[in-house]
Amino acid sequence: MEAKDKIILDLEGGTGAWSKPYGDAGYGVKNITLPYWDLTDERTVEYCCGLDVYGILFALDCTVPANSGA
């Protein structure tokens, strides 16, 4: 399987900067992020589950401090 046949899901990918190296290497990157893609929407979930995914990047925004104080 060639890189172009491998799909990387970039969940909440924003600008796509984190997945850019994969796209540059020839992977098929799908940036699943708002406003077009909503991970709480059933259609988005069905779309993602219907793909033959090779890898997933998922980094949520850290807007709330941890209770541990970290």
Image (cartoon, grey):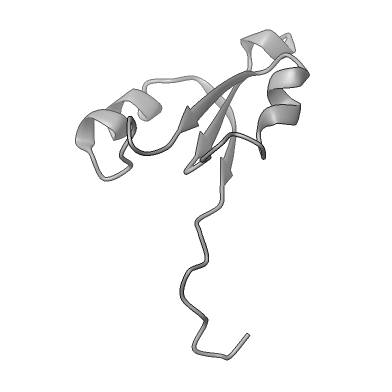
Location of residue 29 by image quarter: top right
**Could you say where residue 67 lies in the image, as x and y percent from the top left?**
49, 89
Residue at the extreme left = 42
Above or below — where is 5 with respect to 69?
above
Q: Is residue 53 left or right of residue 21?
A: left
Residue 19 position (above or below residue 39): above
Residue drawn at point x = 58 percent, y = 90 percent: 69
Residue 57 drawn above or below residue 7: below
| Front residue of this view, candidates 3 and 29 | 29
The image position of residue 6, as x and y in percent, is 63, 17
Q: How many discs mark residues in the rendered view?
A: 0
Residue at the image position 51 percent from the left and 40 percent from the top? 14
In this picture, residue 49 sits left or right of residue 62: left
Residue at image position (50%, 59%) is: 61
Q: Quadrant of the C terminus?
A: bottom right
Q: Residue at x 50, y 29 (%)?
A: 31
Where residue 20 sits in the image (x, y, percent)? 69, 29
**Residue 49 sits in quarter:** top left
Residue 21 image position (x, y, % from top left): 75, 29
Position above or below: 64 against 24: below
Q: Quadrant of the N terminus?
A: top right
24 left or right, relative to 15: right
